[in-house]
Image (tube, rainbow, N blue to C red):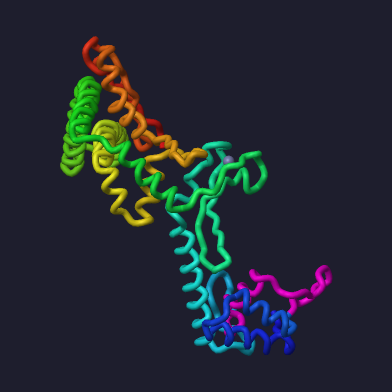
């Protein structure tokens, strides 16, 4: 690897210029290209101006500070450095800081970005900006179908503030009352209890078997110390016991996840819904984004600027149960699905007696 006399001064200058902290990599590249920095020609490729990535590689290459990277570690090279190590380090921290800033910027994108869809043609709505002649910039959501002419959609742009208000208001519609909460929580408990009843026997058996195996293991060890059994016999029995205990542990964890975890998940979901509207109104951008992703599978804005939300599970089922429940009660029969994405379990329809709700709890594997 050689830095020729023509490029070396330009590269040294690039490090100094960038370390001043005022020029972006793009601006620096423009300056360097104007000053005549081109790539080293190869038999296949003639020299040409550097691209942004190539310049980025130059600025992060420790070679220019007199260091070579060999098998992942840095070693002092035999060549003359073009830049002082301190200058090189300064450039690295600047690059890192700017990258972090860029990442933050992406993460703090608008909390509705990517969630809204056009109610007319179902395309995703994109965040767009328009600046008026006086220099004021306005943010809008525009239909990507219309913007790209992929569809014949003619829907108007929706000001960001309108979209924000519609979504914030939608949380009032999905918030459930304390009464609803108590009613639904009781149904969830009843369904899990009914399902758990059959499993209690299994749980007791597993626990008893675990205790038996542990006692056997202790006895074997004592026998071995008393020279009653040899080491290979001990080992054979211990292997069997270890395998048995591992299997029991696995079954108990499964038991725990399905019953305790699934039940807690549904209770948490119900609890979230009782406070949804107030919580959303008091949340920061990041939390709103999370909430929108958690509660909604899709949010459409219709041509007359109404929000058409589709709830994600288990919220869709819960809300449906609270709003549709009264009608169903008159018919003396209803059953509802509660699907949750975190746990794998299936609670079969229970309590389908003429005057009670049948509650079906289903969770799909994440
Ligand atoms: Zn559209």
- Residue shown at the point (56%, 59%) measured from the top left: 130
Res 185 visible: yes
Q: Is residue 288 magenta?
A: no
Count the numbered circles shown: 0
Q: Is residue 233 visible?
A: no
Give how far across and how far down residue 13 sits, in percent: 63, 88
Residue 118 image position (x, y, % from top left):
53, 41
Quadrant of residue 250 in the image? top left
Does the stretch in magenta take in 66?
yes
- The image shows residue 118, relative to residue 112, as above or below, that is above
Q: Quadrant of the N terminus?
A: bottom right
Q: Residue at x 71, y 79 (%)?
A: 33
Query: Image quadrant of residue 149?
Result: top right
Q: Is residue 314 above or below residue 198?
A: below
Start and end of the magenta stretch? 38-67
Q: Which quadrant is home to the C terminus?
A: top left
* Nearer to the camera, 252 or 22: 22
Residue at the spot 62% in from the left edge and 44% down from the top edge: 146
């Amino acid at each position: 690897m050689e830095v020729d006399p023509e490029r070396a001064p330009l590269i040294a200058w690039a490090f100094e210029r960038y370390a001043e902290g005022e020029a972006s990599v793009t601006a620096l590249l423009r300056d360097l290209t104007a000053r005549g920095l081109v790539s080293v020609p190869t038999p296949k490729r003639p020299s040409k101006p550097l691209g942004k990535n190539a310049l980025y590689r130059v600025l992060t290459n420790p070679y220019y500070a007199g260091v070579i990277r060999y098998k992942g570690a840095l070693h002092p090279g035999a060549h003359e450095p073009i830049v002082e190590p301190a200058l090189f380090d300064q450039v690295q921290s600047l690059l890192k800081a700017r990258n972090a800033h860029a990442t933050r910027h992406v993460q703090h994108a608008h909390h509705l970005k990517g969630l809204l869809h056009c109610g007319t043609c179902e395309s995703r709505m994109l965040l767009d900006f328009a600046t008026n002649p006086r220099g004021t910039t306005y943010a809008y959501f525009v239909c990507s179908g219309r913007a790209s002419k992929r569809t014949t959609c003619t829907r108007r742009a929706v000001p960001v503030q309108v979209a924000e208000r519609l979504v914030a208001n939608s949380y009032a519609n999905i918030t459930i009352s304390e009464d609803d909460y108590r009613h639904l929580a009781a149904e969830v408990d009843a369904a899990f209890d009914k399902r758990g009843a059959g499993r209690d026997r299994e749980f007791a058996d597993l626990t008893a078997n675990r205790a038996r195996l542990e006692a056997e293991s202790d006895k074997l060890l004592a026998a071995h110390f008393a020279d009653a059994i040899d080491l290979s016999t001990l080992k054979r029995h211990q292997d069997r016991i270890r395998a048995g205990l591992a299997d029991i542990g696995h079954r108990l964890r499964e038991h725990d996840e399905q019953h305790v975890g699934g039940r807690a998940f549904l209770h948490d979901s119900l609890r979230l819904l009782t406070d949804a509207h107030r919580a959303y109104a008091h949340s920061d951008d990041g939390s709103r984004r999370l909430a929108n992703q958690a509660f909604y599978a899709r949010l459409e804005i219709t041509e007359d600027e109404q929000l058409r939300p589709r709830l994600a599970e288990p919220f869709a089922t819960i809300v449906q149960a609270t709003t549709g429940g009264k009608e169903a009660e008159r018919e003396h029969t209803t059953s509802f699905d509660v699907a949750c994405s975190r746990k794998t379990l299936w609670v079969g329809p229970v309590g389908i007696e003429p005057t009670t709700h049948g509650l079906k709890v289903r969770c799909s594997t994440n």
